[in-house]
Amino acid sequence: MISLDKLRKRSGLVVVVIAVALGAFLLGDLMNSSSSILNGSQGVIGEVNDEVIEYRDFETEAQNLDRIYNTRQDRSTLRDNLWADKVNQIIMEEQYASLGLSVGSEELAGLTFGYKSAEMSNTAKQFFGISGQEVAPGQLATLIQQIHDNDPQRWLYFENLIRKERLAQKYNTLLRNGLFASAIDAEAYYNEQGTQASGRYVFKSFASVKDEEVEVTDAEVKSYYNNHIEDYPQDESRELRFAIFDIIPTEADKQAINNRLTELLEDKVVFNKNTKSNETISGFRNTTDAAAFINEHADSSFDGTYYAEGQLSPAIESEMRNAEIGFVFGPYEEDNIYKLARLNDRRNDSIQVAIIDMAIDASEETANEIYAKASELAASNDVESLEAAADAQNIALAAASVQDDDRTIAGIGEARNLVFWAYSNDVSLNSVKLQDLNDRILVVMLSDIIEEGSQDIETVRPQIEFAVKKEKRAEVLKAQFEEKLVTTTSIDKLASAMSATVEQVNTLSFSSNTVPGGYEPDVVGAFYGLEKGQMSNPVVGNNGVYVLFADDFKKSVVPKDFDALKKQLEAQLQPRASFEAYNALKEIADIADNRAKFY
């Protein structure tokens, strides 16, 4: 039996356990909000098949999930998972309803807290920490009541996970049962995989046709573009030009910090206005209270640790280990920090070292100078003036393309706020943003707004010209082959007439997709379309044009066990049912994702 104390302890890990148990299953709904504080389209985070997802409702669920996960999950990832779950739920609930699939209350109760562990879902078993044993009814009932009373939202979340898991199982079972391999499928597969072809071919590569034979006109480029415009899609994006001004200390800044440390070394005489007399203030070398001195002057607090041999930084280990108490070393630089080190105490084989550290930062004057340069660049009102100003300052400009849901920018890193800015309705073309990031300043210009549609013809001209030339080269080679085939009766004579060599293929299989010349699935298919002793017409492949001759086809000697083949095909087909069906449903769904306007 499982003890109640053990169940209580295990229930605290429910979220992690459920996430592992469900794997591919998405996050569930926690609550339904009856109203939104945002009205109209501005408050709509998305729509799926005409079902509106309100921002306020979505964010409330995200906050409750964050509580349930106890901040174990990154907030952005949590929202992404919640959105994916919303899309999945709306799409699949339509399928469940049309098929009449449901989970009854008695069925859900059995899956959730059936007293015999065999009747419980795997999710419930992991929730309660059950691993095969039967559970004492009284213990389980008490635990369920405690969770239900103390954290009802967590309980509803748990029940909803089990319900969704069960509905998905039923749906996937229906799909799998509807997918089977027939005897015809098995026989076709047997013949394809069990037949090996051998033959010969003559090949002429596209490169054998000279460029002057396939010159491309503007009219041909335009015609190809219009006929293949769907091959050149263009997503909506924003183009950014930016410069990064790193706020780094100058040599003068470094020397000033070094001087400040040096001044702390020795005693100094100061005039006391209260006593109307001079008095001596001990420096770091002579102070009797190193801890107080460090806490007053250093960036870090005093560290009273005693270090055994080899435990100190290599920069001071040899200097301090055998020195006298009070010995001071420095200033020295370590990890972009200037330091003074004093041997403060010795205890057996360990020593205590007092260290004053000052970070090597840019001075306020240096930072102001850099900010002034960035501001000058930010005054640009178009790309041309931005480039001119950057050239005048000898500043490197970079470019990046971003889409509305990007969270990072190449060359900058994490920059969701800049992406949000670039897509704001209040930001127009050539707008400039100056952003202070403490250790660097960014000057970013919105240099172009790319609308969704097709890429401009000039942008894809190189690809189009390459494709048209390839088509023209294929036509030239096909014409050459066809001319020789009129008077040629054998593959060897054809090779001689074409100034080519005969290539041999042996034990070619239908699924190989390759010949000695490279990846050529169309050529392999053409081989299997021939009869023994037959020569093909010219076949255009990926690398050139082929003429094939089939020498022989050998059938497999393996017995035709179609029952075994059917099981093999079904084992390959059925596991694809769930994710391929959902992907197809998602592809045809009408989904409007407005999250980039909110996060």
Image (cartoon, grey):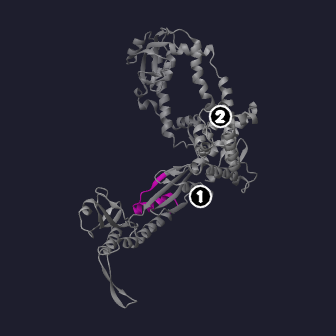
Q: Nearer the viewer, residue 499 or 307?
A: 307
Q: CA distance from mark 1 to mark 2?
A: 55 Å
> x and y percent of residue 143 in the render?
67, 44
Dot 1 lies on which element?
A: loop
> x and y percent of residue 590 in the render?
68, 40
The answer to whether residue 225 is left or right of residue 93 is: left
- Residue 160 appears in the figure: no
Q: Which residue is mark 2?
A: 121
Please determine whether, in this image, residue 167 is positioned above or below residue 364: above
Q: Which residue is mark 1?
A: 428
Name the kind of residue labelled 2 in the image.
Ser
- Residue 388 appears in the figure: yes
Please determine whether, in this image, residue 336 is positioned above or below residue 407: below
Q: Nearer the viewer, residue 123 or 306?
A: 306
Q: Earlier in the sequence, mark 1 or mark 2?
A: 2
Quadrant of the image containing the N terminus = top right
Name the kind of residue labelled 1 in the image.
Ser
Please determine whether, in this image, residue 554 is positioned above or below residue 98: above
Q: Quadrant of residue 268?
A: bottom left
Which span is picked out in magenta?
380-399
Dot 2 lies on which element?
A: loop
Query: Which label lies toward us, 1 or 2?
Result: 2
Residue 382 inside the magenta-drawn segment: yes
